[in-house]
């Protein structure tokens, strides 16, 4: 296969990533260069599996939501037979947007320009004055275009535009084991609470993905006020004890974890005890996964490229409410090299009571939302990271960012050989191999020839 044609500038930056990662260095310009961004839309978002929605958002036949792959709108709809379709939101006649609401329930989508009408499987079913205008033309060949592949994992709906993409399970690799650990804890699974929040930030999408790979080092400085107001129940130094895991190429995560199950403090990410009791019944996950969940205070991870997950005990007001388990997922939707739209969902285990779901939702709103304490902390530095990435100085000076934490001889983090799950594992969370894992796969995807994929397992696995 022929490698994709990269501009000289993009080629230079990818070379810098591949040669610099062994020294823990990454060129800052990948956070703002417009040529890099255009390549990302095609080689990253145009090929990788991208999270779009949760099945609970389209529970009934005819339910739909409009979501994005890269900058492009897709209709995620449950058809009359109960199957899920991901349809490019563009009429086959003139390319006009056919869906004008962000969500709803319908039996058909009708183009406002000339009235071409499609059902929920994307089939063209009619148009005004059909016999005079199009009699004899094939309807079957003029339906809405579908994503190349669609699949779901624990109700999490993903799609890819690349027909040569591996299966979703193969793409997730070892990360699937950790998604099972979080989303498979309860027999009934999870559901979305309310519509996703959406807000725009002048930052690059990689800042959010990088952070949720496991940037735990910033917690004691940027989020110091969270401890001061009692929003999080684990002291900072204890919270840094845990594991960084490169689950599979591109996908990374972090656990804050008690040394053993008898350690005082939150278990099962802080979910209420009566909810946690249901986690321990049945055999939905392995004993090893269950023990990790039992000891876990925080789970944070990123499925490459832009789908992030967080489970932890939080409260919006420590004086009035004790911390409770919060489960949130989000995507960092690109809107240009210097802007993202954050889609932020809150989820709950279906077996939780309405009161428990409401408490978790309110705790999440006060901490990880457009007005939440964590969100307001995080987005300010990300704005300046993007500004640096777009700067002339960063380009002319070949300015590189330091990702050396946890490399041999630097810091206290050490490799772990007896971790029961898949991936490359380090103790403690003072470590940046999780981010280096993301950028290594990123550079490989940016250069991967059409129809070919980088290795989805680590050497020796």
Image (cartoon, helix red, strand yellow):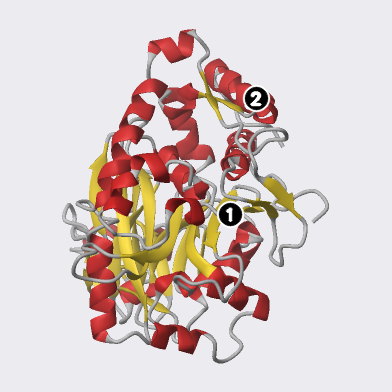
Going 59% across and 45% down the picture, which residue do you hit?
Answer: 434
Determine crowd level at label 1: few under 14, some 14-19, many 20+ residues with C-alpha closer than 10 A: few
Using the rendered image of the protein, determine whether residue 182 is visible from the camera's viewpoint. Answer: yes
Determine crowd level at label 2: few under 14, some 14-19, many 20+ residues with C-alpha closer than 10 A: some
For numbered disc 2, what is the local secondary structure? helix
> Residue beneath label 2, please?
20
Going 48% across and 74% down the picture, which residue do you hit?
Answer: 268
Using the rendered image of the protein, determine whether residue 97 is visible from the camera's viewpoint. Answer: no
Where is residue 237 shown, x and y percent of the image?
A: 49, 51
Q: Residue furthest bottom?
A: 282
Q: Which mark is residue 437?
A: none
Using the image, determine if residue 267 lies above or below residue 97.
below
Task: Indicate the quadrant containing the C terminus: top left, top right, bottom left or bottom right.
Answer: bottom right
Q: How many marks?
A: 2
Q: Along the horizontal axis of the image, is 196 left or right of 452?
A: left
Using the image, determine if residue 412 lies above or below residue 247.
above
Task: Indicate the quadrant containing the N terminus: top left, top right, bottom left or bottom right.
Answer: top right
> Residue beneath label 1, please?
163
Going 47% across and 83% down the picture, which residue do you hit?
Answer: 186
Single out the mark in the foreground, 2 or 1: 2
Where is residue 221 shown, x and y percent of the image?
A: 38, 39
Using the image, determine if residue 290 lies above or below residue 175.
below
- Mark-to-mark CA distance, 2 and 1: 32 Å
Front position in the image: 378 or 141: 378
Where is residue 167 shown, x and y percent of the image?
A: 62, 62
Going 43% across and 29% down the picture, which residue do you hit?
Answer: 31
Where is residue 97 shown, x and y percent of the image?
A: 25, 52
Q: Residue furthest top?
A: 396
Using the image, determine if residue 59 lies above or below residue 421.
below
The answer to which of marks 2 and 1 sits earlier in the sequence is: 2
Q: Along the horizontal axis of the image, is 314 left or right of 216?
A: left
For numbered disc 1, what is the local secondary structure? loop
């Amino acid at each position: 296969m022929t490698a994709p044609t990269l501009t000289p500038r993009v080629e230079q930056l990818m070379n810098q990533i591949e040669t610099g990662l062994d020294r823990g260095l990454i060129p800052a310009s990948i956070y703002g260069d417009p040529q890099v961004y255009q390549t990302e839309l095609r080689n990253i978002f145009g090929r990788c599996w991208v999270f779009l929605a949760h099945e609970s958002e389209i529970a009934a036949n005819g339910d739909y939501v409009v979501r994005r792959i890269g900058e492009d709108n897709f209709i995620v709809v449950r058809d009359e037979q109960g199957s899920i379709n991901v349809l490019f939101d563009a009429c086959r006649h003139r390319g006009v947007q056919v869906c004008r609401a962000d969500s709803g329930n319908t039996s058909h989508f009708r183009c406002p320009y000339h009235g071409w009408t499609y059902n929920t499987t994307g089939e063209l079913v009619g148009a005004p004055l059909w016999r005079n205008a199009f009699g004899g033309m094939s309807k079957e060949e003029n339906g809405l275009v579908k994503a190349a592949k669609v699949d779901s994992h624990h109700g999490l709906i993903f799609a890819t535009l690349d027909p040569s993409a591996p299966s979703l399970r193969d793409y997730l690799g070892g990360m699937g084991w950790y998604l099972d650990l979080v989303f498979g804890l309860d027999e009934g699974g999870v559901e979305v609470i309310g519509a996703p929040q959406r807000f725009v930030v002048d930052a690059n999408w990689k800042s959010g993905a990088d952070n949720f790979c496991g940037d735990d080092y910033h917690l004691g400085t940027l989020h110091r006020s969270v401890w001061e107001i009692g929003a999080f129940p684990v002291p900072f130094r204890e919270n840094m004890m845990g594991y960084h895991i490169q689950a599979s190429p591109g996908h990374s995560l972090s656990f804050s974890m008690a040394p053993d199950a008898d350690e005082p403090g939150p278990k099962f990410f802080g979910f209420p005890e009566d909810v946690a009791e249901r986690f321990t019944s049945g055999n939905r996950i392995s004993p090893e996964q269950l023990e990790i969940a039992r000891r876990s205070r925080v789970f944070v991870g990123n499925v490459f490229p832009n789908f992030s997950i967080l489970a932890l005990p939080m409260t919006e007001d420590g004086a009035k409410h004790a911390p409770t388990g919060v489960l949130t997922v989000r995507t960092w939707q690109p809107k240009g090299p210097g802007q993202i739209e954050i889609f932020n969902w809150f989820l709950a285990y279906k077996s939780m009571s309405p009161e428990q779901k409401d408490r978790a939702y309110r705790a999440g709103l006060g901490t990880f939302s457009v007005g939440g304490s964590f969100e307001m902390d995080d987005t300010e530095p990300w704005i300046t990271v993007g500004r640096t990435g777009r700067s002339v100085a960063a380009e002319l000076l070949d300015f590189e960012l330091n990702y050396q934490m946890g490399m041999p001889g630097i810091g206290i983090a050490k490799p772990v050989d007896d971790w029961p799950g898949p991936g490359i594992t380090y103790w403690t969370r003072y470590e940046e191999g999780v981010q280096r894992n993301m950028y290594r796969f990123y550079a490989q995807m940016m250069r991967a020839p059409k129809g070919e994929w980088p290795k989805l397992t680590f050497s020796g696995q």
